[in-house]
Image (cartoon, helix red, strand yellow):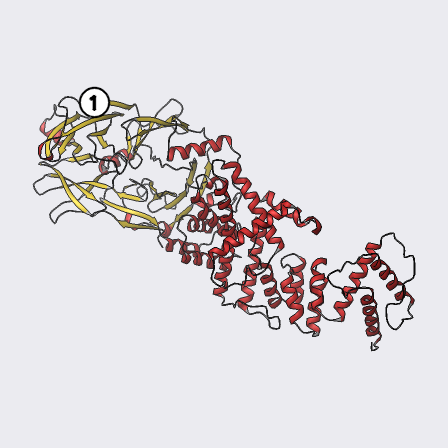
Amino acid sequence: MKILCFFVLLISDTSENSSALYVVNVERNGKVIYTWKGNQRSTHIGLYDLQTKQNEHLYMFEKNLHIISCSINNERTLLAVSFCQYTEEEKASQLLQSVSKYLTLLIEIHPINNVRVLKAVDSCVRVQFLYPVEGRNASRESRLLLVSEDKYIEHFDIHVVAEEEHKVVIQKSGQLPRAKVVDDLVWAQWDMMEQRLFYIVPKESKSTLRCVQFYPDENFNSILESHLDIAVNDTQLKLVNFGYDYCQDQDVASKSLNLQVFTSKAGYNKTFTVSLERTESHELKEVAFMNLDYYVAAYLPGQFLHLLNVQHPDLLCYSLFLTGENARIDTLQNCSIRSPWVSTVLACDAGSLYNVSISDSALLQFLQKSKRDCERLAALHCALLYFQHTEDLEMQIIRWISENLSTCHSFDPIQEFIIASLYCRMCPEIQNLDKLLPYTSLHDWIGVVPGVICATDIISLPVLEFQNSKGFWEKLNSNLESVKYAEPHLHYHSNALRREWRNLSEEREERRATAYLRNIFENAKKVLSHLDTWDSEARLVPLFEEEDYQQQLLMGLMVVQLKDHLMRHLQYVGKKKIDQIVLDYVANLLNLVHRIMKEVWRRYQLHSCIFCFDERGTAGEFAVFHIMSRILEAANGMCIPLPPGFHTLHLGLGVRCLPLHTLLHYIDNGILQLTETCVRKLLKDLDDTEQNEKLKFSIVMRLPEALGQKVCQYWNHPINANLIARKYVKLLLGKLGNRQCSRPIPERLSIPVEFLPLNYLTNMLAEIENQGVHPYEKQDHVNARFVEETALKHTMTLLGLKYS
């Protein structure tokens, strides 16, 4: 099972008689420069276009040369080449004392014409043309960086002119204009896609990392400075992505710091300490780094493959730490590796260029086979946030969740699925929304990753030396400002929502008609109507078919509080846009719960109507009931609303699947909630066998007062009548308070009953009713006479007598 997929982008030779091909550079436009040896000891330079898959011959030297560095300008009119003229053995044998070892040339190649010497020195030189932004018209000026082993970098301006027959030549015959970019550096890296130069200048105590940004308007500025907590004492210059000279790079690598910069809008600083499975020094190679955008891959052949999450680096459990066969990359097992641009790997010694991606099928297999929570969390996070969501991928993730609810101990997979999916769907909506919405349900993670220790380094923030910059630097600056001035955690959380929901849920009914609450329920209606426009087809799962006061209250309240949260931090975004974002967020949340329900419904082949209480539930129904219980637990933990009808469906499955004592235990502990729809159907549809009477009685005894008044009338049974009468008496006597009955009340029955205690009670109740007190206003038949008749029937039943 291989997590990373490799697709070959570059062929390895050009003809039958050619010798080994070596890649020497990859330009910003994706064109690859390579070199090979011809039959007559000649040295050739070619260009490969990744898009057209075409090769082009650029230049030939009529002698065997070791090409060190090569670059071609954007217009393909100039070629810069640096090479070694002889080896140390040749120098000793031929007494070449006065000949410089390294030569750097600038060659006109449109067509092949003049050759100009830029450098003739005994120190190695690398060359790199700067590239303008894509789509810009051809320029008459090219700019070239020259990097010397003597620890300096120069910038050349090269003006060209077009002569007859489209010939392009260098304009000036004299010395080319040049400017010193940096001196005394010990390490440098070129970012060809963004045209940035990173370099390190050593200081006495701390080294300093700086960045120079080159712009299309021919300017370049120092744009970043950051102090590093590492000592760089290398005497030899280490270069990254300034072309690829395998032999020399290997020699330098063994003597210098293995360092590479990956630019990320998030930014972080962590130190990883890794235990190796085998420590034979002759087998250990240099750790290779690959830029996968969302991840940085750290690969040590034969040891590990770590996918370090640079988008959300806070928690160690969101990075993948692979060992053994999972970490094996056969394609790169014995290669020197470079990452020229995002999701691309160059095997320098093999001369092959690969496109790299994470395999979704291999990742899902890894998720299914994982035994540790750290592995499950990392794989689940990657599947939800790295890949584009498809219906098939979601289905497989939901299936895995439903099968592993009891095996995940340090996190709730349902919570992770909902929160991460919402984050992935919503954050592309608007800039900086990713800072304000949660991407995980975890606040921290105290688990361990075997063999890996991670320390978060507290460092001084980098200094950005620019104004009014756009793109990457603007985003990075925004993130740094958030760290310096904003709250520690800007992500929306549900603490305030939970408190407010609890308070409003306990409001008395007469106080619920306030403008504030009307606004909350209007928001809930908007969410539900918004959701209806997405899914107009008949729903497989019987949800969204009834009103649910509590869930609609939570739904509308979440809209209010999330809107306030976004308005505080996205003041530059219009109110209308924020309203839409919030409606989308809450509607997507409900839709995700429905999506989980739909998948498990299909899997266990349940029908849309399961409210038939005269049969016991199937094994599939019990499995769905268990999953719904976990969904409820997850929702309660995050204080998020559930689709209206969820509690009715859950209770219906509970009645079918659970023995009575377990059912009542679930109700008493709040796992199952009694809803009007389900209780009414249960009281009406079930006949009055002894077992069903016991069930109905147990349910009725647990009904809240308001709900009991609505549904008890659907059960025409002495037990129910007795309960109603008892509650009615209790309510009326509670209304009486300290008032006294002032006069006797006439008998209420057609045949007077000579039972003084009952007569006194009914007279008292009738007097209270005459004072305008009637707690059961919607049930006219419940009154003093109903109490008297019920009491007599109950007494006669207890005495074994017949009531007529």
Q: Quadrant of the N terminus?
A: bottom left
Mark yes or no: residue 434 visible.
Answer: yes
Mark 1 lies on a secondary structure that is loop
Give the image location of residue 432, x and y in percent.
45, 39
Q: Which residue is mark 1?
A: 177
Above or below 363: residue 624: below
Report the side of 113 relative to 280 (left or right).
left
Report the side of 588 relative to 754 (left or right).
left
Give the image location of residue 445, x and y in percent.
52, 44
Give the image location of residue 759, x and y in percent.
89, 66
Above or below 564: residue 161: above
Amino acid bearing label 1? Pro
Q: Quadrant of the C terminus?
A: bottom right
Above or below 712: residue 284: above
The front one of 505 and 306 is: 505
Give the image location of residue 280, x and y in percent.
34, 43
Residue located at (52% from left, 38% from top): 567
Residue located at (10% from left, 39% from top): 42
Mark yes or no: residue 704 visible.
Answer: no
Q: Which residue is at the far left? A: 40
